[in-house]
Image: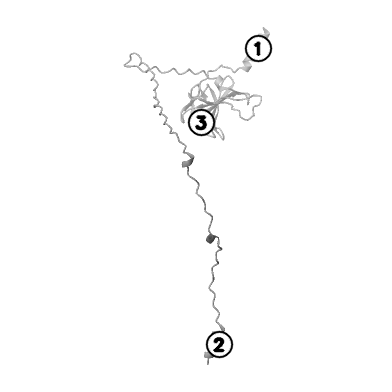
Amino acid sequence: MRLSAVALVLLALVLPGRAGAWSWPVDGPVLRPFSFDPAHPYASGQHRGVDLGAPTGAPVAAPAAGVVSFAGDVPTNGLSVTIRTADGYSATLVHLGSIAVHAGESVAEGALAGTIGPSGTPELDVPYVHVGIRRTDDPNGYLDPLSFFPARAEAVPAPPPTLGGGDPLPEPAPAAPATTESPPAATPRRQRSRRRRPASSRRRPRRMHPPGPRALRPRRRPQTHRRRRPRSSSLRRTALRRP
């Protein structure tokens, strides 16, 4: 009996309590899940809550009933609201666009707490709200918010269309695959047989005659026109003619 009582106490300490009711703050999808290691609370790459997507300006409800312990602007988280529950948990809504409550106010589950932002320094490019839940007496006692929220019902597929409220329309028959006829194969052209000419009818190579004696003569160099020197007799004549 003592062992069973000790086991129940340990289970109560490990598992989060469900004394109060919890609900989803928005109806949007989970954009980023919870990722936290209590043994290494300050390790990089951790996510101490969940990011829920919703349109900008959509209402954000209080996830649980309690007292607002903080409502204001934080440099990085932007507009934030923290609600302390009666069973010892603190739920925080971060990156709000506006705040509809003030510190010290008692809020009911599902009451309007603010609207979708963003504000501060958001980590995603789409509008969303960050929800974090931890034990109030433990600064690093963060827990997965999805373990507190109720399970969502799966969407029921829409019925098939009907004709005037009667039987549903029959599904169209699958179209038969189109057959493509291949073009007729081209008939090969008849190759002509190349007859070999007899040796007598073949062309003989042209003989190259040796160059004649005229072609072998050395070419004369072109003569340059030189000024002709006067003869001695002409010099004498010119000398006699002078007075």
Amino acid type, residue under disc 1 in the picture = Ala
Q: Secondary structure at mark 1?
A: helix
Marks 1 and 2 sit apart, C-alpha to C-alpha, by 158 Å
Residue at the location (47% across, 39% down)?
A: 198
Query: Of all residues shown, which one is farthest toward the left?
Result: 164
Amino acid type, residue under disc 2 in the picture = Arg
Q: For label 3, count other residues whose C-alpha is less than 10 Å away and answer few (under 14), some (14-19) or many (20+).
A: many
**Closer to us: 190 or 167:** 190
Query: Of all residues shown, which one is farthest toward the front?
Result: 200
Q: Quadrant of the N terminus?
A: top right
The location of residue 12, given as percent across then percent down, is 62, 15
Q: For label 1, count other residues whose C-alpha is less than 10 Å away and answer few (under 14), some (14-19) or many (20+).
A: few
Total numbered labels placed on residues in the image: 3
Which tag is nearer the camera, tag 1 or tag 2?
2
Look at the numbered discs 1 and 3 and tell me whether their residues touch, using CB distance below 8 Å.
no
Residue beneath disc 2: 236
Q: Is residue 115 above or below residue 109?
A: below
Amino acid type, residue under disc 3 in the picture = Leu
Q: Secondary structure at mark 3?
A: strand
The location of residue 169, given as percent across then percent down, is 35, 16
Which tag is nearer the camera, tag 2 or tag 3?
2
Q: Which quarter of the picture shows residue 80?
A: top right
The location of residue 103, given as percent across then percent down, is 54, 28
Q: Secondary structure at mark 2?
A: helix
Query: Of all residues shown, which one is farthest toward the right?
Result: 2
Q: Which mark is residue 96?
A: 3
Q: Which mark is residue 7?
A: 1
